[in-house]
Amino acid sequence: MIDPLLAAVLVGLGGSGGAVGRHAVGLHIEGRRSVVAVNSLGSLALGVLLAAPIGSGAILFAAVGFCGAFTTFSSFAVETVSAAADGDNRAAVEFAVANLAAALPAFLVGAAVGGALS
């Protein structure tokens, strides 16, 4: 069992790295494509981490902290609602489907890779 203070520090440190990584991706990939990119990459990494034989400290740091801050449900929601509010329902649906169509298989591939590591 990890000390609660250490757990909070691990999540915070991982989260700061994930947030910086998310921002860096946004500097190189603009708009909705950056949201799909980080959600897919983060889902892939999360799949690996959750299936790999790593300890609870690593899970807190990398999966909860880093992946939690790197992926972005809030931007996904804002971009989807924004497209719909602008009257572009097709773009809203396509964006939502693209996120799911990319992130879910990425997670499954990551889980297969992580499982192969055990």
Image (spheres, rainbow, N blue to C red):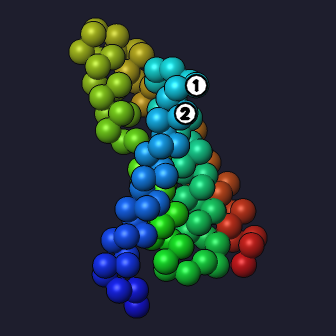
The correct choice, above or below, for 69 with respect to 85 in the image is below
Q: Position of residue 63 (x, y in %)?
A: 49, 63
Secondary structure of residue under mark 2: helix
Q: Position of residue 59 (x, y in %)?
A: 50, 71
Q: Position of residue 95 (x, y in %)?
A: 45, 25
Quadrant of the frame with the C terminus: bottom right
- Visible residue check, residue 29: yes
Side (left or right) of 105 relative to 60: right
Q: Residue at position x 61%, y 70% from top?
A: 51
The correct choice, above or below, for 83 with respect to 27 in the image is above
In the image as oriented, which residue stretches furthest toward the left?
Answer: 85
The answer to which quarter of the image holds residue 37 is top right
Q: Are marks 1 and 2 in contact (CB under 8 Å)?
A: yes
Label 2 sits on residue = 25
Residue type, label 2: Val
Side (left or right) of 55 relative to 97: right
